[in-house]
């Protein structure tokens, strides 16, 4: 029988049930569009059998490209065959599987009867529960976890080696662990466990960002015992380092969701929320609360800090700060980016070690001090201003002292400029105290983020530049 070149090919995709369509697709708020994601870097194996109930032989493996495409060829006789396609979610950076130390090959396609060749084209092949005859929900979850983790890893790596994961991350999903809570285990093995009932986008990214922190952390190997002294690390009051560790993971998850899928960037909490609803009456209590840490980090990396209004405790204001501040005369634009925040974990600015998550004094206030030493765009005065603006017992808004946002670099530049103008008697008259007004970067759609599990809604930006007087602001 003549031999021909067989080809089994397709574009692997996974049906995304996690990233809300209502947010992704403003034209279709009913969310009926199914979002499919390409599966890149997945090892695909094709097996074939000429018999109805015969044994399958491997035709080899190949890794999918960025668009999920794979193609496996074999020179064989023309007899019709049954095919099996299996995938393995494992490479040098990431593995996703349900059991430890097992090579997990997931069946994603099986011929119903023998198929004629030589071209077996699966086309756009979408993994969803029930597709291909035998795709299980856990296979769909694993594939989706792979897609999400790869997006996060690529986004971090694109910022440079310092922001990238340093070692392979192993995600177990769906996993069964003690207590039923998702947790990241950092005893040198970089494992993350995601339980069935906590399978959601925020949890997946939150957990792998715990591992990121572990990989960018100075200190002891007995990391888990130090941080997870008790199994619950999200109590109202924890040691500052524990609250920081939890708060950072949560903050990072929301920032990455914003950067990768344009989900709403989170806003800091209002004073009302911190003091009245969460009973955090002082800065040191905020520091010991993981949501408080989230709030600090969101304020630091807000699009336009001067615009934030946190209100005063006891106000019937919302859960989050509003973006209604009068920014006339204030520096505008983002001072600190998410990637700048990652940089603060590294040595620099006189700090001789990486961040020390196991050291109790490493809370958010120390993080702010480090940030102002390490980052050019975050001055001591900006750091102090934000601490004052987050203090639940205070009344300061960022716009009240927005000149403090100006960095030392800017200050020096302005000082030099003034000196030059003073020297040049014939030059144009000095333009006085005009502030830096250029916008560094603004996102077109800004929306309020809900906390995980809460209803998320997109608030389209309809607000005109506010002209309200300050005196009416606090009513
Ligand atoms: Zn956590």
Image: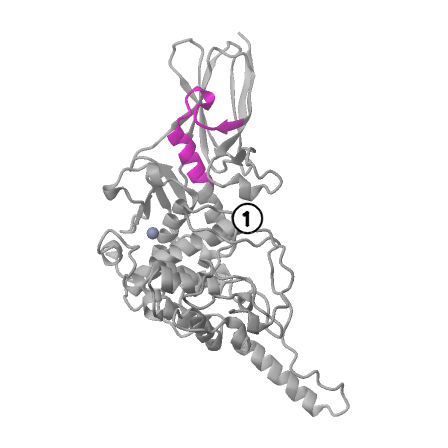
- In the rendered image, residue 127 lying in the magenta stretch gets the answer yes
Q: Position of residue 246 (x, y in %)?
A: 34, 56
Question: What residue sits 31% from the left and 45% below the top?
Answer: 182
Question: What residue sits 55% from the left and 14% below the top?
Answer: 117
In the image, the residue with mark 1 has its CB under 8 Å from the nearest atom of ligand 1:
no
Q: Please determine whether, in this image, residue 187 is positioned above or below residue 297.
A: above
Dot 1 alpha-carbon crowd within 10 angstroms: few under 14, some 14 to 19, many 20 or more: some
Q: Is residue 103 left or right of residue 471?
A: left
Q: Position of residue 124 (x, y in %)?
A: 56, 27
Task: Give the residue number, with chain letter if any, for mark 1.
Answer: 458
Choose between 176 and 288: the one closer to the eye: 288
Colouring scheme, one of rainbow, by chain, secondary structure, one colour:
one colour
Q: Position of residue 372 (x, y in %)?
A: 45, 73
Choose between 473 and 13: the one closer to the eye: 473
Residue projecting furthest to the top: 1
Q: Please determine whether, in this image, residue 246 is positioned above or below residue 354.
A: above
Q: Please determine whether, in this image, residue 278 is positioned above or below residue 88.
A: below
Q: Is residue 29 left or right of residue 270?
A: right
Magenta residues span 125-147
């Amino acid at each position: 029988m003549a031999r021909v070149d067989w080809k089994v090919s397709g574009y692997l995709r996974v049906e995304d049930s996690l990233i809300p369509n209502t947010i992704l697709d403003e034209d279709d708020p009913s969310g009926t569009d199914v979002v499919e994601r390409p599966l890149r870097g997945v090892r695909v194996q094709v097996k074939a059998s000429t018999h109805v109930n015969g044994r399958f032989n491997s035709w080899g493996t190949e890794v999918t490209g960025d668009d999920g495409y794979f193609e496996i060829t074999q020179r064989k006789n023309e007899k019709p065959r049954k095919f099996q396609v299996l995938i393995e979610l494992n490479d040098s950076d990431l593995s996703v599987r349900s059991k430890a130390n097992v090579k997990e090959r997931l069946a994603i396609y099986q011929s119903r009867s023998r198929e004629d060749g030589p071209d077996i084209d699966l086309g756009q092949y979408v993994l969803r529960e029930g597709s291909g005859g035998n795709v299980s929900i856990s296979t769909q979850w694993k594939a989706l976890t792979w897609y999400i983790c790869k997006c996060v890893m690529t986004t971090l790596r694109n910022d440079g080696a310092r922001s990238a994961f340093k070692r392979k991350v192993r995600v177990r999903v769906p996993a069964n662990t003690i207590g039923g809570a998702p947790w990241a285990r950092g005893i040198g093995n970089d494992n993350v466990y995601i339980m069935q009932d906590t399978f959601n986008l925020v949890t997946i990214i939150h957990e792998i960002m715990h591992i990121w922190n572990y990989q960018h952390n100075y200190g002891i190997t007995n990391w888990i015992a130090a941080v997870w002294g008790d199994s619950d690390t999200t109590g109202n009051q924890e040691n500052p380092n524990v609250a920081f560790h939890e708060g950072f993971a949560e903050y990072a998850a929301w920032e990455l969701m914003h950067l990768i899928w344009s989900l709403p960037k989170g806003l800091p909490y209002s004073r009302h929320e911190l003091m009245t609803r969460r009973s955090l009456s002082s800065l040191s209590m905020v520091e010991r609360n993981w949501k408080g840490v989230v709030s600090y980090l969101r304020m630091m990396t807000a699009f336009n800090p001067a615009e934030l209004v946190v209100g005063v405790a006891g106000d019937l204001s919302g859960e989050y700060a509003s973006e209604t501040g009068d920014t006339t005369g204030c520096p505008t634009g983002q001072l600190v980016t998410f990637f700048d925040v990652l940089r603060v974990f590294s040595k620099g600015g006189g700090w001789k070690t990486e961040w020390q998550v196991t050291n109790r004094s490493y809370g958010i206030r120390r993080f702010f001090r480090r940030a102002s030493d390490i980052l050019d765009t975050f001055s001591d005065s900006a750091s102090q201003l934000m601490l004052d603006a987050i203090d639940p017992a205070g009344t300061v808004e960022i716009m009240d002292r927005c000149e403090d946002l100006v960095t030392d670099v800017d200050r020096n530049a302005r000082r030099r400029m003034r000196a030059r103008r003073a020297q040049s008697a014939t030059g144009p008259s000095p333009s006085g105290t005009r502030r830096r007004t250029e916008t560094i970067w603004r996102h077109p759609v800004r929306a309020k983020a809900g906390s995980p599990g809460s209803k998320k809604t997109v608030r389209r930006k309809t607000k005109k530049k506010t002209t309200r007087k300050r005196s009416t602001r606090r009513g």
